[in-house]
Image (cartoon, helix red, strand yellow):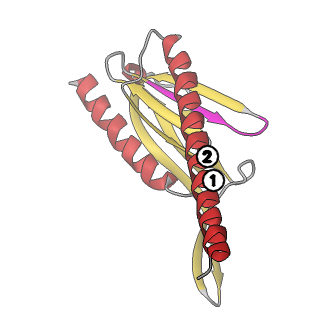
Amino acid sequence: MDLTTSLIGLGMIASLIILFVAMKISNNNKEKKKFQEISKIASRQNSKISQLDSSGNFIIGIDENTNFLFFLKKDDNTETDQAVNLSEIQSCRIINSGNSINNKNGNYHVINKLALSFSPIIKGKLDIEFEFYNSETDTYTLSGEIQLLEKWKGIINNKLKKIKA
């Protein structure tokens, strides 16, 4: 190899490394900003986030001391922030609605909506939903949201058992 080819190769490798580092810094800044925003929502309820998860355009967190759950979802045009007092909730379930499509290649389930739904203890009150995905408004492809909802359903229902005990 001659010197010119080596320098071109090193330059390309250095460019890729710089690109990956810049992407990592950008993602870290986005995550930090989401955490700061959900922390502000929590502070309105005199709460502090003790556990959280973030994916794509949403973040969910809980204050295990005050029993409050917080949710923030930001799209290009909309921002949704919600808080729910788990002391007022009877149960949590996952909403996974969609359509089945049958064709010559097999059967497929197309997800239209993913949400956590909270049933209040007080009869007659409407369920509260944290909508994680809606095919009509969200433009991104799902990646791990179902597993994240399963995880949080477990966290929440375990917390509800402790509150009732």
Q: Amino acid at mark 1?
A: Leu
Around disc 2, counting alpha carbons within 10 Å, would you say few (fewer than 14), some (14 to 19), or many (20 or more)? Answer: few
Q: Which mark is residue 4?
A: none
Between residue 111 and residue 49, name the one nearer to us: 49
Q: Is residue 70 magenta?
A: yes
In this view, which residue lies farthest toward the left? 165
Q: Is residue 42 above or below residue 118?
A: above
Q: Which quadrant of the rendered structure holds the C terminus?
A: top left
Which span is picked out in magenta?
69-77
Where does the image place residue 21, in percent across and percent down from the top left? 56, 48
Q: Can you identify the residue that label 2 sits on?
A: 22
Tell me if residue 154 can be seen: yes
Q: Amino acid at mark 2?
A: Ala
Residue at 58%, 23% (x, y): give it. 37
Where does the image place residue 90, in percent across and percent down from the top left? 38, 30
Q: Which quadrant of the rendered structure holds the N terminus?
A: bottom right
- Is 122 placed left or right of 139 in the picture? left
Where does the image place residue 27, in percent across and percent down from the top left? 58, 42
In the rendered structure, are the residues bearing label 1 and label 2 in contact, judged by CB atoms less than 8 Å apart?
yes
Around disc 1, counting alpha carbons within 10 Å, would you say few (fewer than 14), some (14 to 19), or many (20 or more)? Answer: few
Q: Quadrant of residue 161?
A: top left
Tell me if residue 131 can be seen: no
Where does the image place residue 100, in percent across and percent down from the top left? 61, 71
In this view, which residue lies farthest toward the bottom? 104
Q: Quadrant of residue 58?
A: top right
- Kindly report the distance in space between the C-alpha atoms of the residues bearing marks 1 and 2: 5 Å
Per the image, label 1 sits on a secondary structure element best described as: helix
Between residue 117 and residue 12, name the one nearer to us: 12
Q: Can you identify the residue that label 1 sits on?
A: 19
- Is 38 placed left or right of 19 in the picture? left
